[in-house]
Amino acid sequence: MPKRNAFYAQSGGVTAVINASACGVIETARKYKDQIGKVYAGRNGIIGALTEDLIDTSKESSTAISALRYTPSGAFGSCRYKLKGLDQSRAEYERLIEVFKAHNIGYFFYNGGGDSADTCLKVSQLSETMGYPLQAIHVPKTVDNDLPITDNCPGFGSVAKYIAVSTLEACFDVASMCKTSTKVFVLEVMGRHAGWIAAAGAIAARKEGELPILVLFPEVAFDQDKFLEKVEAMVKSHGYCTVVVSEGVKGPDGKFLSDQGLRDAFGHAQLGGVAPVVANLVRERLNLKFHWGVSDYLERAARHIASKSDVAQAYAVGKVAVEAALKGRNSVMPAITRVSNRPYKWKIELADLKDVANKEKFMPPDFISEDGFGITRKCRTYLEPLIAGEDYPPYVGGLPDYVQLKNAPVPKKLSASFEI
Amino acid sequence: MPKRNAFYAQSGGVTAVINASACGVIETARKYKDQIGKVYAGRNGIIGALTEDLIDTSKESSTAISALRYTPSGAFGSCRYKLKGLDQSRAEYERLIEVFKAHNIGYFFYNGGGDSADTCLKVSQLSETMGYPLQAIHVPKTVDNDLPITDNCPGFGSVAKYIAVSTLEACFDVASMCKTSTKVFVLEVMGRHAGWIAAAGAIAARKEGELPILVLFPEVAFDQDKFLEKVEAMVKSHGYCTVVVSEGVKGPDGKFLSDQGLRDAFGHAQLGGVAPVVANLVRERLNLKFHWGVSDYLERAARHIASKSDVAQAYAVGKVAVEAALKGRNSVMPAITRVSNRPYKWKIELADLKDVANKEKFMPPDFISEDGFGITRKCRTYLEPLIAGEDYPPYVGGLPDYVQLKNAPVPKKLSASFEI
């Protein structure tokens, strides 16, 4: 079989370990130089393929590529560009195939969440229809942990570790001064639809009830009175309380709690988070001193406190993606299968993209405690191994020594440009 | 000389390394068992002394005490209780002396910022007036870095490291997606009066201009138009921009920028941060997509990413405080003197409390760049050594293994209680 090139793209919100998957893809491809030519990357994700803006990763040294393992964010750029169905976006899919053809690309590695799994599946279907041989492999990534089949998603373990460690540290801080100062700390975390990230706040306590932590999930409609009762009880028993609130929490009316119709002094709409809303409620109704924080991008970029198993899994799904392609597999996703909890063991198995695309995995109801403000033992057993182990980046002069690649462009071959 | 006990208290906002100072005090005192009896700690700070609520640290194992070195927050509790002048608060000072007398306390170690330096000085003066021999030593601590004489304050280096690392990681994250998504990220940091913490955001870039970071200092009146111009220029040159804003930034009218008179849907006053205000401005005036974060307590509690030199200095000031007391010194503070920048060398020298109390150290004007949105080379040279080196806590099961002490009470000896 003649040697063909590979294309790799990053999709959607970036994570602390998506570059570790890129590292897994590129390092593995480099081991099979007899079968895979160059690895091209899409500049700013799939847009790079559509506009024929490709990056030649062969111009990067092996040191630079191995540094991707400990560099957060998307080294080649990412985007949220969603390709629609084949019938609506046929021109886009055809353009992709055209670009792949022009650059002799036989392997398509698409690193992202649910949307990119769907795109990957469609590309694979079209390549068959068009008679252009292509192996399309989806490499899973999402801090939201909402992909089906895989036990967990690369990217989630590290954000979970960041939230667990931050919640623990916040608890210690507030406990120190709660006698005379702040009694309620509210930490807003990501998660529009699923409460996986918020749930990680609860494992800051090694045992249920060890620390006064209260979680607000998007899966549970916000009950103001029950919430305030709970806060009051925790402040009474522990002297303070830490609330970890998902950005996606909704009231009984189905509206986001963050959407409070705030106006600034000039009457302009103010875009606030949910943390100040919850904190304000605590102040107005319970008259307790509060502080609040919103970690936002910091939580998903925090490679400095990445989970060791997350880094290992992110690398592994990249590596297995290439190996699967070389074995002739198509339209699959390397998924993580949990083998045992203690000790934590996992392996990578290939899932059919048809079973992955367009399915979202929410927190199972038996992962949320009966009162709706915490997690069950089952959830704890699931989460704990995912934050285990540290994998520190190297530091120079007090800062992580993250790599910035050269990202040299591949000369264009097509005359036609493509409008996004 | 008969053996006398020591009293140690933590004051004001806690830090990632104030317990390292406690560790320095207690471990050193334990080495001089022939001269120092027990070390008592004030439960919840100086309030513990006033109410005779003392903790017997001799009940803690040497393992537990050595774990304080890597445990953030205030292990014995802290408070912001400020003792006023001797004439106004004479009863309080006399009560302190009375409690010290009852428990044979001859050494007073007060670990805090400017206010506690002042209290420490007054206690020392009163002990002389009242003929009660006491050596009062102030142990410096403050994330605000605003104490005079000492080159820097224990606690600041770690918060600076957290902000520098977080700003670096946020820059990488935003850079990945700025082509099609967020172009401006606003990170709010602590600092009501002095911009030291915000300045640390600027050293995320190893060289001036390497990363598009813009700092808003409380020392510089906010100029909306100049700011927006700067943001626009950075987005043009780098594709994105990260704004690190001090909570204490004020407009030209002298009012906090965060004080926008926000009202929620019910017309109630909403307590917001400054980050959403700045982010909103960017959206309204430049129509750029933004995200914002507020790290709040997370930044000062983040022992997981503490600066190695900060931890070492925090321990050293505690150790030297005890050694100074044993040498008969009184009314002094161990201060950090910088010996050289490269390699970074420092030593501890004793400063007279009269020169420390009631003086605040702001950012020197020649530390802020001419345009008011960044730092000078001089500031960079000052800051860089303070974040150098990592000092990771031990982990168990993915979480830092922070210690919680027993905090056993010392039996009361006085019949009179004292109302705070």
Image (cartoon, coloured by chain):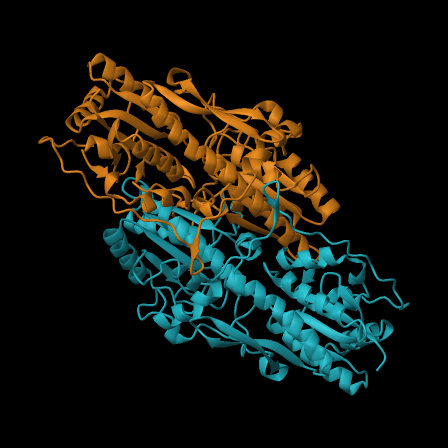
Chain colours: A orange, B cyan
Task: From the viewer's side, name the closer residue of A168 and A351.
Answer: A351
Q: Is residue B420 visible?
A: no
Viewed as shown, does residue B335 lie left or right of A131? Answer: right
Examine the image and state in which quarter residue B38 appears. Answer: bottom right
* Viewport quadrant of the N terminus of chain A: top left
Q: Nearer the viewer, residue A71 or B259?
A: A71
Residue B121 on image: x %, y %: 67, 80
Tell me if B128 is positioned left or right of B308 in this view: right
Name the residue rendered at 48%, 30% in the picture: A145
Please tell me whether residue B297 is drawn above or below residue B222 in the rendered image: above
Please provide percent x and percent y for residue B243.
Answer: 37, 55
| Rendered position, A233 above or below A50 | below
Q: Where A48 sits versus B36, above or below?
A: above
Q: Is residue B257 above or below residue B174?
A: below
| Label total for image | 0
Horizontally, residue A317 falls left or right of residue A174, namely: left
Instruction: Report the quarter where the C terminus of chain A lies.
Output: top left
The quadrant in which residue B180 appears is top left
Farthest residue in the left direction? A415
**Closest to the observer, A343 or B318:** A343
Q: Residue at x 21, y 25 (%)?
A: A3
In the image as oriented, which residue stretches furthest toward the front? A34
Is residue A194 visible from the viewing direction of this image?
yes
Apparent side of residue B409 relative to residue A179 in the rendered image (left or right): right
- Identified at 76% across, 70% down, the residue is B7
Q: Position of residue B285 (x, y in %)?
A: 30, 51
Q: Residue B96: which quarter of the image?
A: bottom right
